[in-house]
Image (tube, rainbow, N blue to C red):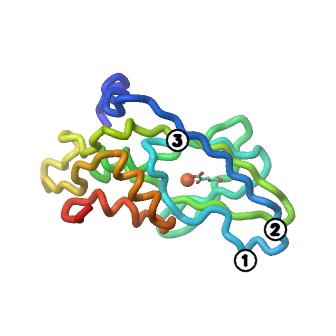
């Protein structure tokens, strides 16, 4: 995003990490249950650790669900909504879901890096395309963005619309 590390940390005002452990019990009919519904994360970035040998995470790519199979001793870094807003849609938050497995339990550990509640997130001026000058996102207070997205049920990326120009918050 053509921004140095210190400035990036400054934009968050405070480095807050939220942590979630997801447990997907074994299923006899995995295609009839959904582990985690399609969503993008409302954080800045998410760092995910998955079991070394149990698959379950899928990302949406070109309108298809693509499995992200675990690579031993590796972490998955997920670009999330705040980066999409800062970059005016250039770096998109990735839509993902988790599916259950036949007779096999899975655990994933997610760390969400989020800005301080009072921080106003808005697109960075230098991320505006000089040709189109189009501004996709408006200024939103992170705490309000977080609360508004948590009030909704997870429906892909529908919640990021509240930060779009022309949408009444
Ligand atoms: O279990 C997974 O692989 C995904 C979990 C997830 O998307 C989340 O906790 O936000
Ligand atoms: Fe997620």
Mark 2 or mark 1, which has the lower sequence index? Answer: 2
Callout 2 crowding tier (Cα within 10 Å): few <14, some 14–19, many ≥20: some
Q: In the image, residue 12 lies at what x, y percent? A: 36, 33
Would you say 114 lies left or right of 30 here?
left
Would you say 54 lies left or right of 20 here?
right
Mark seen at residue 32: 1
Task: Provide the residue designation for mark 3.
Answer: 112
Q: In the image, residue 94 lies at what x, y percent? A: 47, 55
Would you say 25 lies left or right of 7 here?
right
SS under mark 1: helix
Would you say 145 lies left or right of 130 here?
right
Mark seen at residue 27: 2
Residue 137 higher or lower than 33, as above or below? above
Gap between marks 2 and 3, in whole Å? 27 Å
The residue at the point 51 percent across, 61 percent down is 39
Residue 154 higher or lower than 42, as above or below? below
Q: Answer yes or no: disc 3 within 8 Å of ligand 1.
A: yes
Residue contact at pointers 2 and 1, CB within 8 angstroms: yes
Q: Nearer the viewer, residue 108 or 152?
A: 152
Q: Nearer the viewer, residue 146 or 7?
A: 146
* Quadrant in the picture for residue 163: bottom left
Q: In the image, residue 92 lies at what x, y percent? A: 39, 53
Gap between marks 1 and 3, in whole Å? 28 Å
The residue at the point 78 percent across, 63 percent down is 101
Gap between marks 2 and 1, in whole Å? 9 Å
Mark 1 or mark 3, which has the lower sequence index? Answer: 1
Residue contact at pointers 2 and 3, CB within 8 angstroms: no
């Amino acid at each position: 995003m053509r921004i140095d590390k210190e400035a990036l940390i400054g934009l968050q005002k405070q480095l807050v990490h939220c942590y979630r452990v997801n447990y997907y019990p074994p299923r006899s009919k995995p295609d009839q249950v959904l582990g985690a519904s399609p969503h993008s994360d409302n954080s800045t970035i998410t760092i995910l650790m998955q079991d070394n040998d149990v698959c379950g995470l899928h990302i949406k790519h070109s309108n298809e669900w693509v499995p992200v199979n675990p690579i031993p001793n590796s972490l998955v870094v997920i670009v999330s909504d705040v980066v999409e807003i800062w970059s005016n849609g250039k770096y998109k938050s990735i839509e993902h879901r988790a599916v259950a497995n036949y007779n096999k339990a899975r655990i994933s550990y997610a760390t969400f890096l989020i800005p301080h509640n009072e921080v106003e997130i808005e697109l960075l001026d230098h991320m505006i395309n000089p040709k189109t000058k189009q501004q996709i996102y408006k200024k939103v207070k992170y705490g309000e963005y977080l609360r508004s997205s948590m009030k909704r049920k997870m429906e892909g990326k529908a919640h990021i619309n509240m930060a779009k120009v022309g949408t009444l918050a």
